[in-house]
Image: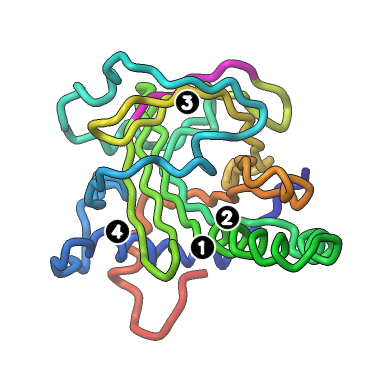
Amino acid sequence: MVVRRSVGVVFGSAVLLNMFAGCGGEETPKTKPKSETPTQAAQKENSSLPPQLTGATPQTGSSVASENPALNVASTDIGDLLKPNATNPLIGSWLGVATLDTGLLKQKLERVDDVERTRLQKVADTFLTYQVAMDFYSDGRLGMVVQFSLEGSEQLISATGTWKEVQRDAESMIVELVEQVEGQTANTSQVRIMIHPDGQQIARPAELDAQLAVCEPMFIFNRIPEDFAQQIANQPAGTTIK
C-alpha cells in the first residue's frame, strides 16, 4: 500500500480544529495556547467508539474491564510531550480522514443485488464522513477525537488511552492501542500503521463491512504542525496556508 501525500487534508485540519473547539455552543477562540491539542479542545460524548477505529489490520482485540491508566494522569502542560521525535515518528498531533478505493467500490456494487447495493453504499458513505484527530504523546498516552455523520446527524466522540510500539520495519509499525471512551470499558488492539518516508503522513487500515474489505478502507493522517493554530490565526481571510 502506498501512502500518498494530500495537501488538502492538512489545510482541512483548520476547519476540523475549529469544529472541535466550538462544540457546545461556545465561541471558538481565534488563537489557542500552543500546548492545547485537538483532543483537549473537544467535548466528551458518552458514546461507543466507532468500530472502524477499534478494529484494524492486523488486530487482536479485546474489551478490558480494568481501569485505563491514562485517565488517571493529571492534566498539565503537555505541549512538550507532542513534539516530533526522530526516534519515534508517531509522536505528535495528527489529522486524518477516511478513504477507500472508489473504483473498486463501484465494481463491488455492480456485482450485488439492489438491496445489498443500497446497504453497502450507505456503509461506504457513512465511513467517508469520518474525520479523526489523534495525539500520540511521548509518555505513551493517546488522545483521540472522532467526528462523523450518521443518518444526517453529526456525531462527535472523544477517547483517551495508551499506545506502545510492538514491532517496526522500514515502512510501518505495529502498535498496541488501548482506546476508551470515558465511562466505558477499554478496547485493546494491535494495528499496523504505515509511515510515509518523510514522517509527515501515516495510514491506518480500517475494518469495514466484510463485503467492502476489497475497497482498501483506511484512515490517512497528516501531521499537524506545532504552530498550525498560530498560522491560521495570522492568515488573512480568504487565503490558504501552503
Q: Position of residue 175 (x, y in %)?
A: 55, 24
Quarter occupied by residue 187: top left
Badge 2 density bin: few <14, some 14–19, many ≥20, Cα 10 Å: many
Q: Are marks 4 and 1 in contact (CB under 8 Å)?
A: no
Dot 2 corresponds to which residue? 98
Q: Are marks 2 and 3 in contact (CB under 8 Å)?
A: no
Dot 3 corresponds to which residue? 177
Query: Label 4 amino acid?
Result: Phe
Kind of element beneath mark 3? strand
Q: Earlier in the sequence, mark 3 or mark 4?
A: 4
Q: Nearer the viewer, mark 1 or mark 3?
A: 1
Q: Are marks 2 and 1 in contact (CB under 8 Å)?
A: yes
Dot 4 corresponds to which residue? 20
**In the image, is 85 to the left or to the right of 104?**
left
Q: Position of residue 168 (x, y in %)?
A: 65, 21
Query: Label 2 amino acid?
Result: Ala
**In the image, is 27 to the left or to the right of 182?**
left
Mark 4–mark 1 Cα distance, whole angstroms, equals: 15 Å
Q: Position of residue 18 (x, y in %)?
A: 30, 65
Kind of element beneath mark 1? loop
Query: Label 3 amino acid?
Result: Leu
The verdict on residue 165 being magenta is yes
Q: Is residue 125 above or below residue 141?
A: below
Mark 2–mark 3 Cα distance, whole angstroms, equals: 19 Å
Any mark on residue 129, and which?
1
Mark 3–mark 4 Cα distance, whole angstroms, equals: 23 Å
Give the magenta-colored segment's residue range.
Answer: 161-167
Q: Is residue 179 above or below residue 6?
A: above
Mark 4–mark 2 Cα distance, whole angstroms, equals: 17 Å
The residue at 20%/52% (across/down) is 33
State the colouring used for the structure image.
Answer: rainbow
